[in-house]
């Protein structure tokens, strides 16, 4: 098997496995380098053991326009600690000696552009990254990066939102690799008390244009919400709720790992239970 197929298969194989078993996926997000890169490595392994199916590593950035206060603070802590894109790629290389869980970098465009698109794609593929999410890069302007990462076998995961037009959804459906990130609301990341009332109509609209797996993110803060949204999509993405636990227990690494693992386990169990019981 060549390098490209190995890279692509980690994401597609996981979703294929989920479909075969009738399960919905849990995608978890943490900010790389928060509180430090050694802790990030331990958190990745703990989340995998607790049931995460795919893990997003946030690349800290000084102007995270799509993120709410919880992830903004995490980015600030990581940057103060000296976290860089180069060091995150080194972390992924280290993690690949211990795990084959699909790993996706969630980054803004500027860090990648400054690093060099071709250099980034080559090194990310070499260390074992499987995909990239760039929330501030619209599909119409993503061709150069998309060509570089696809050439190296990585997936450039597109985002769609309730404001996405039918034309854009159709274009995404024709070209998207891996899965489609469905932003559940118009706004920034963060925990919410309620899921949007029109989320079901939005996901149906995306489903009518796209055959790829749909992962729903933004605003999912507890197991009950995860279970509800898992019935609509193929996976749910939880970020701020986990990053908040990291922040709360950052002074006690053992407690932090235990509490993050506990939350991830609860989320996965809720997704399984909600789907099996048909609750919505």
Image (cartoon, rainbow, N blue to C red):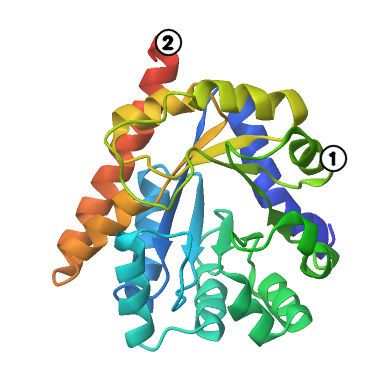
Image x and y of residue 128, in percent: 64, 68
Circle 1 Cα neighbour tier, 10 Å, few/some/many (<14 / 14–19 / ≥20): few
| Residue found farthest to the top | 278
Quadrant of image for the N terminus: bottom right
Image x and y of residue 35, in percent: 29, 74
Lower position in the chain sequence, tag 1 or tag 2: 1
Image x and y of residue 108, in percent: 57, 69
Q: Which residue is mark 1?
A: 174
Is residue 124 rendered to the left or right of residue 108?
A: right
Q: Residue at x 36, y 20 (%)?
A: 273
- The front one of 269 and 157 is 157
Quadrant of image for the C terminus: top left
Is residue 162 rendered to the left or right of residue 11?
A: left
Q: Which residue is mark 2?
A: 278
**Residue 240: mark:** none
Q: Is residue 219 above or below residue 41?
A: above
The span from disc 1 to disc 2 (Cα, nearest Å) is: 31 Å
Q: Is residue 9 visible?
A: yes
**Would you identify the image quadrant in which residue 96 lies?**
bottom right
Circle 2 Cα neighbour tier, 10 Å, few/some/many (<14 / 14–19 / ≥20): few
Under circle 2, the secondary element is loop
């Amino acid at each position: 098997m060549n390098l490209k197929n190995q890279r692509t298969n980690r994401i597609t194989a996981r979703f294929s496995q989920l479909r075969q078993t009738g399960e919905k996926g849990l995608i978890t997000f943490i900010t790389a380098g928060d509180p430090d890169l050694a802790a990030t490595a331990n958190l990745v392994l703990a989340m995998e053991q607790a049931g995460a199916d795919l893990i997003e590593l946030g690349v800290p950035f000084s102007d995270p326009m799509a993120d709410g206060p919880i992830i903004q603070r995490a980015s600030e802590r990581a940057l103060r600690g000296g976290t860089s894109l180069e060091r995150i790629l080194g972390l992924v290389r280290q993690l690949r000696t211990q795990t084959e869980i699909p790993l996706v970098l969630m980054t803004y465009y500027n860090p990648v552009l400054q690093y060099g698109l071709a250099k980034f794609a080559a090194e990310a593929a070499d260390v074992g990254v499987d995909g990239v999410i760039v929330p501030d890069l619209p599909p119409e302007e993503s061709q150069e990066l998309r060509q570089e990462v696809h050439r190296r076998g990585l997936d450039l995961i597109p985002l769609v939102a309730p404001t996405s037009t039918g034309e854009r959804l159709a274009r995404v459906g024709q070209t998207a690799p891996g899965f489609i990130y469905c932003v559940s609301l118009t706004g920034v990341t963060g925990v919410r008390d309620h899921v949007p009332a029109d989320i079901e109509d939005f996901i149906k609209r995306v489903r009518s244009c796209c055959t790829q797996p749909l992962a729903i993110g933004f605003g999912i803060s507890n197991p009950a919400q995860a279970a509800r949204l898992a019935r609509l999509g193929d996976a749910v993405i939880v970020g701020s709720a986990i990053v908040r636990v990291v922040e709360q227990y950052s002074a006690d690494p053992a407690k932090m790992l235990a509490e993050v693992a506990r939350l991830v386990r609860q989320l996965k169990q809720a997704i399984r239970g909600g789907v099996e019981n048909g609750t919505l």
